């Protein structure tokens, strides 16, 4: 058995593994694999602990399936015992990296999220436009460089990721386990893993640091692989885009999406994280409205057929109401019948809903 540091000891402790088991089963406790693990919970956790301590643990094969929302995504689901390990790892190492993350990284972090990212971007826009208004040379309302990374999760290089992790994790036992998880997938990192959310933020923290510390860009914000940089000078942002493109290619083996790396005037509207920010207001993206209409009709068909519960439909409606309430979308919510809990109003036609002044293409 390998000598253990305090970090690895905490990771493989029964207390941490039991907590990881509870987190991994949350909201899914009646699935077969979870019930089987839970029937002999203490024994299974102790076996897992023994494998980790002796470094005989091997990650199991993934189950793949496709999820279609705004686009098709291949999701890889790890066996339940491996998901317990993922939670155990994140419990212990996430705080180490969280201390280093910049303030304006908003995905998969406590106290962050979509709404805080949008509010921060609104603050950036107001601040930049105030500066532009008093500038000697007028710069209009400023410009936005909006980018995302082509096939981000699939493109993460295992060797680069491991080197980045090793800069802050010095324990060989923890690094062994991290390598086992990373190499459980042939390429990139699986979207379905909890560890992948952390790894993805750790990987692009290198970009965050480069943009903030080397390029000294003040108005920079990132949500996973989507990021924006605001500026008063369009030519400056064009130069920043090329420098960032080279950094991603040379240092992280990533590629900017060829069709989603644009520079445009802020006054035309900034489309980010499902909302369009324009004239000091938040609008709902038209394509999102169309998806909600289509999905609600589909869910209602399933309820009528008895293959979906009414509770699940109401849960989806509650989620969509929350999404729209964050925007200036009173008229749109009224058209869609989302004005109150349990409301059963019929959906307007696609043409009616998407012609609403509260939905922006």
Image (cartoon, rainbow, N blue to C red):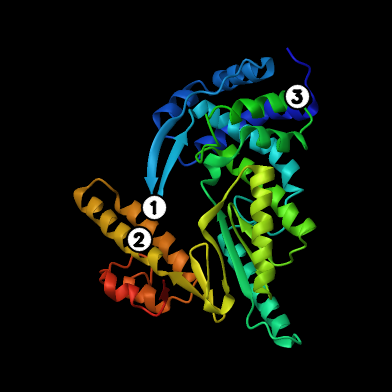
Instruction: State which tag comes first along the sequence, 1 or 2.
Output: 1
Q: Is residue 328 above or below residue 255?
A: below
Rendering coords of residue 238 (x, y %): 64, 66
User: Alpha-carbon neighbours of circle 3 within 10 Å: few (<14), some, or many (≥20)?
Assistant: some
Asked whether the residues under the numbered discs 1 and 3 touch, taking CB atoms below 8 Å apart as contact, a structural biologist would say no
Can the viewer see residue 19?
Answer: no
Name the residue at 75% across, 41% down.
96
Query: Would you say the residues marked 1 and 2 are in contact, meaning their CB atoms lie under 8 Å apart?
Result: yes
Residue drawn at (64%, 46%) of the image: 249
Give the side of residue 323 with respect to residue 51, left or right.
left
Q: CA distance from mark 1 to mark 3?
A: 40 Å
User: Which residue does the numbered mark 2 point to in the structure image?
Assistant: 291
The label on residue 172 is: 3
Dot 3 lies on which element? helix
The location of residue 164, given as percent across then percent down, is 72, 38
Q: Alpha-carbon distance for marks 1 and 2?
A: 8 Å
Q: Which residue is mark 1?
A: 69
Are the residues at dot 3 and dot 2 in contact (C-beta closer than 8 Å)? no
Q: Secondary structure at mark 1?
A: loop
Horizontal arrangement in the rendering, residue 360 relative to residue 266 (left or right): left
The answer to which of marks 1 and 3 sits earlier in the sequence is: 1
Image height of 320 relative to 197, above or below: below
Q: Residues within 10 Å of mark 2 (few under 14, many from 20)?
A: some
Image quadrant where one finds the N terminus = top right
Q: CA distance from mark 3 to mark 2?
A: 47 Å
Q: How many circles with numbers are drawn on the protein?
A: 3
**Disc 2 secondary structure class:** helix
The answer to which image quadrant residue 284 occupies is: bottom left
Q: Is residue 162 left or right of residue 66?
A: right
Give the residue at x 64% y 20%. 49
């Amino acid at each position: 058995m390998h000598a253990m540091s305090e970090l690895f000891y905490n990771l493989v402790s029964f207390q941490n593994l039991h907590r990881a088991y509870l987190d991994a089963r949350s909201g899914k406790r009646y699935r077969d694999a979870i019930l089987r693990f839970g029937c002999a919970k203490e024994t299974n956790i102790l076996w897992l602990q023994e494998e980790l301590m002796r470094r005989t643990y091997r990650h199991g094969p993934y189950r793949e399936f496709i999820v279609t929302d705004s686009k098709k995504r291949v999701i890889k689901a790890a066996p339940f015992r491996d998901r317990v390990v993922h939670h155990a790892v994140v419990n212990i190492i996430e705080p180490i990296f969280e201390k280093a993350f910049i303030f304006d990284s908003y995905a998969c972090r406590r106290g962050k999220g979509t709404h805080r990212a949008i509010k921060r971007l609104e603050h950036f826009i107001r601040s930049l436009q105030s500066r532009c208004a008093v500038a000697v040379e007028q710069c209009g309302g400023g410009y936005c460089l909006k980018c995302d990374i082509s096939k981000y999760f699939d493109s993460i290089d295992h060797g680069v990721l491991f080197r980045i992790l090793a800069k802050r994790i010095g324990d060989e036992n923890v690094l062994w386990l991290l390598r086992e998880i990373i190499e459980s997938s042939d390429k990139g990192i699986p979207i379905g893993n909890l560890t992948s959310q952390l790894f993805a933020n750790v990987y692009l923290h290198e970009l965050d640091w480069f943009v903030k510390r080397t390029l000294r860009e003040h108005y920079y914000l990132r949500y996973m692989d989507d990021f924006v940089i605001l500026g008063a000078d369009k030519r400056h942002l064009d130069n920043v885009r090329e420098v960032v493109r080279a950094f991603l290619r040379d240092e992280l083996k990533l590629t900017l999406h060829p069709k989603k790396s644009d520079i445009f005037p802020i006054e035309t509207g900034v489309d980010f994280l499902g909302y369009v920010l324009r004239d000091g207001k938040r609008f709902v993206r038209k394509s999102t409205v169309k998806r909600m209409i289509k999905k609600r009709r589909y869910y209602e068909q399933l309820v009528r057929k008895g293959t979906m519960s009414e509770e699940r439909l109401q849960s989806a409606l509650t989620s969509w109401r929350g999404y729209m309430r964050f925007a200036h979308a009173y008229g749109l919510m009224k058209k869609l019948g989302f004005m109150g809990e349990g409301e059963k109003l019929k959906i307007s036609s696609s043409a009616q809903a998407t012609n609403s002044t509260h939905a922006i293409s």
